[in-house]
Amino acid sequence: MLIKRVQLLGRSGLGFLDNIGQAAIILYHAIVGKPDWAHGISRLTQQLYSVGVLSLIIIVLSSLFIGMVLALQGYTILVKFGAEHALGQLIALSLVRELGPVVGALLFAGRAGSALTAEIGLMKTTEQLSSMEMMGIDPLRRIIGPRFWAGQISLPLLTLIFNCVAVLGGYMVGVEWLGVDGGAFWANMQSAVDFHADVVNGIIKSVVFGSVVTWIAVYQGLDCPPTSEGIGRATTRTVVYSSLAILGLDFFLTAVMFGDT
Amino acid sequence: MMKMRTVEITVGAFMIASILSLLMLALQVSGLNTFYKEDRGYKVKAEFTNIGSLKVRAKVSLGGVLIGRVVRIDLEPKTFNAKVWMIIDPLRVDKLPIDSRASILTAGLLGDNYISITPGFNDTEFLKEGDTIPIDSTDSAVILEQLVSKFLAGQTNGNAKPAH
């Protein structure tokens, strides 16, 4: 009985390692090799459109509301201490360091990651990938490569837009509506936010999240059982695993970047 | 499938929007237009007995105007004094008298430590690259806990004497 339990544990551990190894091999085959500039760029553009541009609306809307809520909540607390002029600092630091990269990546996993998994899963289920292979086209280079790069490029760009729009949302509520002094708002923000330590580290975070989310998404798409139920499960798994990976990695990245100050 | 032209135009617009966002984050949010370049200026050392919680990249100011940054903090091996390297922007202050004082102050009650320079009166000799402000013309950080404990010790002594 006990032996069986241990065996079960070992099997699941081996399965986990097997998955990671396969995912790494897929990633390696998809992105390593001589780039095909002539066709690569137009395929990449197509994917940037479906991964990046189509995620823009949800990113802009949610960042606007997040910035506004942050201003409202921050104001009600700060005004008790007579420190409402520090609102800009509060909004900008929490956005640039944490909320921008993390919430942006979570939304991206829900919007673009799941779509990638479903698309690739359906290609596999309808045997488009195998027929490509029969025609002598490497589906990893042709299908996975552009999608991976598109996700990797899009998320940092989306995060930049997220931060920017959210700060503007915070400005709208804090300064225009609640009446914080605009000069103090920007001046405190500028003296508190450091470009290298805060903005660049936030971008580094979003680069890491971008590669992890797209990697999980394309691997789940390729790995899913070729049934309609399998695609559904794979899509769910993409969102769940990406969200967990984002939040877990965020802790480590924060500890490395901001832990020692 | 959409027309390739439309796709390319929207992707281009997306890229431009994100670059504009980066510009705004750099200029408006982090105030990079007043950014102080690290490697421009001359380095001056100063020795302190206690630097409190002074950190690298702390401000160096003269009369409240930012003139430089702390770039390195070390310990003098013989005297066990703290040695602070700061880089001073020659565009702000070109000629700092050699008898200037450096003191570590605190911004507000809970703020960060920074170095404040009080210019001296020598108008023939000036601090240049590699010069040291000696220990007897610097003021160390005021440690709040030490002040409190001194104050409390003074209080108890003062009360104890009349009882004797």
Image (cartoon, rainbow, N blue to C red):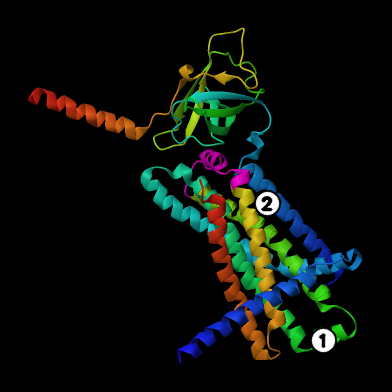
Q: Nearer the viewer, residue A208 or A77?
A: A208
> Which residue is at a point 68% across and 32% down the rendered structure image?
B39
| A144 to B110, vertically: above or below | below
> Which residue is at a point 55% across and 70% down the rendered structure image?
A244
So how many labels did they put on this image?
Answer: 2
Q: Nearer the viewer, residue A138 or B7?
A: A138
From the viewer's perspective, is A135 left or right of A147? right
The dot on residue A130 is: 1
Q: Which residues are magenta?
A: A178-197
Secondary structure at numbered mark 1 = helix
| A143 to A134, vertically: above or below | above
From the viewer's perspective, is A70 left or right of A31? left
Instruction: Please name the residue that numbered disc 2 is placed on.
Output: B21
> Which residue is at a point 62% across and 72% down the rendered structure image?
A110
* x, y percent for residue A220: 67, 79
* x, y percent for residue A96: 58, 52
Secondary structure at numbered mark 2 = helix
Q: Residues within 10 Å of mark 1 (few under 14, many from 20)?
A: some
